[in-house]
Image (spheres, rainbow, N blue to C red):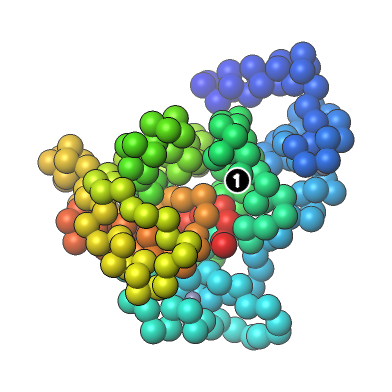
């Protein structure tokens, strides 16, 4: 019922304010669904989607021909605390633009297109079989100072949208207790050091044992090296008693 009202309201809005492609501005007919509500067919086709082969652990795509599964050099010698990570697109071209507008220009309306793209990871054969009652969507948390500045946590907005369309429950299971310096300029070893003690379980989630024994889809907009999500996965498992953590992101940096 709620979904039907939501659909009706957005169809009505489309009628009053005709939609345009977020990338090329071409006008869009109403009644388009999913990511196609924001993007024309040409721009949709041009999205840098990640296709096999990609690393079975960190999702890093392999440029070139390769048959079967492989594990990349990036994570072969790295202890990652999640089962595996999977992303829909590379973080470039239109996807980079959409994420940038969403996060830094406070275009909250773009969470719909990004969550629609994120939902595509659920077609991965390893995720298509998930029991939706056993898995909870948990966002990578922002430090409260950063969240105040940005006015929202992009990962939580994606969780909520995805929860609405898939029925997976969403829960803020983690808190970022210490702000961290920007990771981009750091080596892999420094990144791990930089993240130590940065995350903790949310107290009320912990008290209710809300995630104990269950499995988590850890959500973020972009995955770069996987060190942040790995640290989150470590806390979820060690302190929250979570059995399995799988990382899903819209983009792979
Ligand atoms: Zn377009
Ligand atoms: Zn890898």
Please, is residue 149 above or below residue 143 in the view?
Answer: above
Please, is residue 140 above or below residue 158 in the view?
Answer: below
Q: Secondary structure at mark 1?
A: helix
State the residue at coordinates (38%, 49%): 140
State the residue at coordinates (58%, 56%): 251
108 displayed left or right of 81: right
Q: Dividing the picture into quarters, in which one does residue 89 lie?
A: bottom right
Badge 1 residue CB within 8 Å of ligand 1 = no
State the residue at coordinates (67%, 58%): 92
83 displayed left or right of 20: left
Residue 183 horizontal/vertical position (percent) = 42, 60
Which image quadrant: the C terminus? bottom right
Residue 84 horizontal/vertical position (percent) = 43, 68
55 displayed left or right of 20: left
Q: Nearer the viewer, residue 169 or 24?
A: 24
93 displayed left or right of 177: right
Bin the neighbour count of mark 1 within 10 Å (Cα to Cα): few under 14, some 14-19, many 20 and up: many
Please, is residue 204 above or below residue 43 in the view?
Answer: above
Residue 194 horizontal/vertical position (percent) = 31, 62
Residue 232 horizontal/vertical position (percent) = 31, 57
Residue 141 appears anywhere in the view: yes
Q: Nearer the viewer, residue 106 or 206?
A: 106
Q: Nearer the viewer, residue 239 or 106?
A: 106
Residue 121 appears anywhere in the view: no
Q: Nearer the viewer, residue 151 or 82?
A: 151
Q: Which residue is mark 1?
A: 99
């Amino acid at each position: 019922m709620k979904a039907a009202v939501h659909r009706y309201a957005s169809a009505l809005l489309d009628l009053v304010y005709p939609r345009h492609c977020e990338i090329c501005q071409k006008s869009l007919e109403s009644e388009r669904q999913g990511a196609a509500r924001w993007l024309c067919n040409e721009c949709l086709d041009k999205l840098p989607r990640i296709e096999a082969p990609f690393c079975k652990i960190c999702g890093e795509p392999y440029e070139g021909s390769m048959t079967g599964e492989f594990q990349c050099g990036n994570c072969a010698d790295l202890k990652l605390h999640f089962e595996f990570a999977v992303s829909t697109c590379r973080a470039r071209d239109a996807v980079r633009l959409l994420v940038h507008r969403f996060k830094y220009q406070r275009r909250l309306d773009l969470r719909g297109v990004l969550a629609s793209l994120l939902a595509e990871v659920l077609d991965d054969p390893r995720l298509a079989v998930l029991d939706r009652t056993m898995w909870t969507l948990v966002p990578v948390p922002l430090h409260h100072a950063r969240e105040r500045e940005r006015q929202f946590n992009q990962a939580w907005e994606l969780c909520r949208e995805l929860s609405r369309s898939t029925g997976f429950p969403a829960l803020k299971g983690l808190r970022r207790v210490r702000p961290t310096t920007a990771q981009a300029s750091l080596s892999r070893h420094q990144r791990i050091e930089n993240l130590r003690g940065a995350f903790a379980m949310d107290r009320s989630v912990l008290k209710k044992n809300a995630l104990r024994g269950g499995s988590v889809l850890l959500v973020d907009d972009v995955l770069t090296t996987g060190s942040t999500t790995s640290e989150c996965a470590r806390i979820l498992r060690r302190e929250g008693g979570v059995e399995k953590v799988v990382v899903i992101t819209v983009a792979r940096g």
